[in-house]
Image (tube, rainbow, N blue to C red):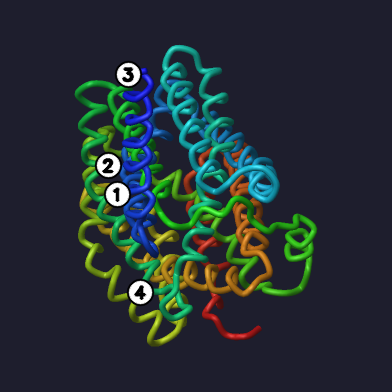
Amino acid sequence: MKGWKIWKENIVFNSKILSVFSRRRFSGLRGIYLATFFLNFGLALLDIFIPVFVWQKTGQIGIVFGFYFIYYLAVVLATPLAATLLKKFISPDYAYFLSVLGRLTYLFFLFLGGQNQLFFFLAAFFWGLTIPFCWLPYYLTVVYEEKEDGFFGKEVSYMNLLSSLAAALSPILGGLLIALYGAGSAYLLAGFFFVLSFLPLYFDRFNPSRVEFSFKDTRFFMKGKQEKSLKRAFWGNGLEAVAILSWPLFIFANLGQYQALGLIKGLSILFSFLLMIWIGRLVDRRGKKIINWGVGLNVFNWLWRITARTPLGFFIFDFLGTVGSILVNTPLQALIYEKARGRYSPLEILVARQMITNLAAALACLLLVFFSKTSFFWPVSFFLGALGAALVYGNDGQKE
């Protein structure tokens, strides 16, 4: 009888603890802001180094883009699956938890790829599968939890600010860890931050049991004549993403050091750090026309990057690319959230974005595999970046 009382008291005590946690959930976008920092710290530990690492282990730059082709194709295939599961079977929090497990699996296979190259392709596939389970819940939380003015410029700038803070510190640390202790140490730390990023989303207030979604509506949006400039921007984002993969390879081919690569990336983000909030507020006050300034800067930057040969030259081009990215992505991301909120289901646009962007990136990777053993590889890579940047032009929120 005494044991029963102790057990019952423990149940009551634990339920009180759980009720305290449920009352102390993050309101608004506070959970998203914390998750943004933790997730991007983990991503930036590895992102710019993975292409170099795969290139070093395989000795073929074509395999690097074969790796990313599998990754992008897996994202395209997994996106409608993730959206359907969110509609019928799982909550956004559970979807994000699955993405954390998938990322840990990806890191494990990436580590094994150092011994057997076949594991690189398994890593790429698992990595791609996790992406929609991570980003769809993330985007949905932003769309539903913004309750101030119906615009997203300020919110996107805060998220970019936290992403940049993480991305400024993380590559420097990642480069040092890889140089001193090997890639495994960076994988472990990245895994820790991936797990940590789940907690703020779990303890925020947004967690519906199901989410509205119709893949038929998404297909109609993708094939229809509506929002042509926005869909063109999605294609452009995919092409530019692949050019961004080429950039650290180009730096490493000329400098040959992980530390230098991490330092250049970290410093360029750090110097552009203070622009984030100002641009977000400018978007909300003046509209999204500043996106076209960023497009012009990015096109110019991509066409001239091939001339860089010194650490200072790489830093200048990387810094200008970061500034251009801020000018483009802050208003573009705000516009996407606004368009998504205006739909019956925000997933209609969010799923289309994931599928179009990653399909474009997969096709660009195939093109670079074709050119990988020719002297045209670097010019084609940077031309893809310029073309992708140009396709974003005109997404200033004006009616078509």
Instruction: Tell me the residue that label 3 is attached to.
Output: 2
Residue 77: which quarter of the image? top right
Give the secondary structure at mark 4.
Answer: helix
Q: Identify the mark nearer the N-term, 4 or 1.
A: 1
Q: Which mark is residue 171?
A: 2
Please state which of residues 26 and 350 is positioned toward the viewer in this rendering. Answer: 26
Residue 305: which quarter of the image? bottom left
Please state which of residues 235 and 98 is positioned toward the viewer in this rendering. Answer: 98
Q: Which mark is residue 52?
A: none
Where is residue 51? Give x, y as percent. 43, 35
Q: Is residue 209 visible?
A: yes
Q: What is the spatial separation of the Cα atoms under label 4 and label 1, in whole angstroms?
A: 18 Å
Q: Identify the mark nearer the N-term, 3 or 2.
A: 3
Where is residue 126? Give x, y as percent. 56, 30
Name the amino acid type tagged 3: Lys
Q: Quadrant of the N terminus?
A: top left
Please determine whether, in this image, residue 310 is positioned above or below residue 339: above
Please state which of residues 330 and 232 is positioned toward the viewer in this rendering. Answer: 330
Count of numbered tags: 4
Instruction: Tell me the residue that label 1 is attached to.
Output: 167
Q: Is residue 321 visible?
A: no
Name the amino acid type tagged 2: Pro
